Amino acid sequence: MRLPLPEIGAPWPDLKLRMRDYATGDVRWREGKTAVYVFNAGPEVEQVQKEAYALFMSENGLGPMAFPSLRRMESEVIDFGLSLLHAPEGAAGTITSGGTDSITMAVKAARDFARKARGVRGPLNIVLPRSAHPAFDKAAAMMEIEVRRTPLANLLADPQAMDATADAATVMIVGSAPCFPYGLIDPIAALSDLAIARDLWLHVDACVGGYLAPFVKMNGGDVAMFDFEAPGVRSISADLHKYGYCAKGASTVFFRSEALQAFMGFDLNDWPGGRMVTPTLAGTRPGGAISAAWAVMNFLGVQGYRAKQALVTRTRERIEAGVTALGFTVIGAPQLGIVAFSHPRVNALALWPGMRARGWFTGMTSEPAGLHLMLSPFHAEVVETYLTDLASALADAGGAAPAQPAARYS
Ligand SMILES: *Cc1c(COP(=O)(O)O)cnc(C)c1O
């Protein structure tokens, strides 16, 4: 039966209780047993997100002239991102509603660049490694662009395969930093060489790594070049609401130059409502997502991010050592916050229900069958519990831990 809107409104305290009740079935991510969908940087960051969001919750980023506050906060957040990602002088960027929005707008800009600046006619395509995020397929479907996915080499984008697949109608090639399934960074330097040699638009999808990799690098991590440092990179997507620890509804898309970014915009005067200019897909843009991003970034600063990201790295290393000791094989050699692992004898996916029963909600991979963790700083507190629970789920599935841990492959 369809629920009608209540005739008479209810008092807010009652509604609050009912919402809490609705949430009893949700994952209890604050306890640390969720490793997908949520990024838990602890209660202090959560408080900053909430209060900063509430301060500008009703304001609208669609109107930068009405809200110079939001315009200023957005431009400062963009400056932070551009400097973290080695953007050259003259580079530009915009806050979007999320990674899918950032990717869609980058594809749109690359498409319009191909049509308007290079005069490409007829059907268009984009070339993606098999591990690239489905947001590219979604964007391509909306714009009637063909998607050509190329096989991976050692789990990474294969520049040779992409070279062989790209043609005169290719509007974009993509590398991930890192890809979502395995948390591995594609060979961006080689893709950049390819992009320059063939005059192709290289987009780096750093949705999950854009605000993590720079700090892992500062902490001494051996992270290869992945951003505007590679001269062939024309655009980058980087999500604030992932490892930027900002409130949800916030990502960034960056372009090597304002001239390239100009292909993203929308500007229409031919209707009765006055001129409509928008940078992204959205009309109304929630002010709270912008103000919360600004506040969290300024709250953490470089030192704060370095400390949080060091916890993520350390946690990933402890998980890798622990699952390897249980006989699992870590998939590739992850360097950031995502780790996936398979088992040589037990189908890792068969362990998921047992882990769920023990309170864990995590991701999975299908090629090969693996368990997938997207780690937050808070997971440092629950590594031992995770490994103990995994050992017992493994034993339930008939796969006891070996005396000799299996070797990892890459
Ligand atoms: C999360 C993610 C996206 C999509 O971002 P949303 O904010 O979920 O729309 C794109 N690419 C990668 C690599 C991601 O991890």
Image: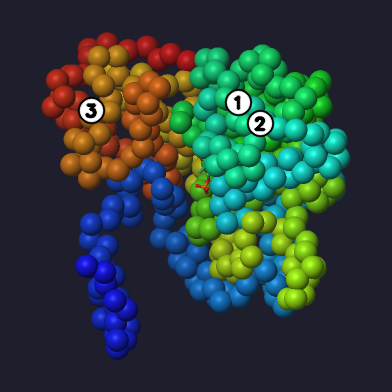
Residue for badge 1: 148
Look at the numbered disc 2 and say if its residue's Cβ is closer than 8 Å to ligand 1: no
Q: Which mark is residue 295?
A: none
Residue 314 at what x, y percent from top left? 44, 35
Q: CA distance from mark 3 to mark 1?
A: 32 Å
Q: Which residue is situated farthest in the bottom direction here?
A: 8
Q: Nearer the viewer, residue 49 or 305?
A: 49
Q: In terms of depth relative to the viewer, which is nearer, 79 or 37?
A: 37
Answer whether labels 2 and 1 touch (C-beta < 8 Å): yes
Amino acid type indicated by mark 1: Arg
Quick check: 181 left or right of 98? left
Q: Secondary structure at mark 1?
A: strand
Q: Quadrant of residue 328?
A: top left
Residue flagged by tag 2: what amino acid is it?
A: Ile
Residue 17 is left or right of residue 170, and the answer is: left
Q: Which residue is mark 3?
A: 350
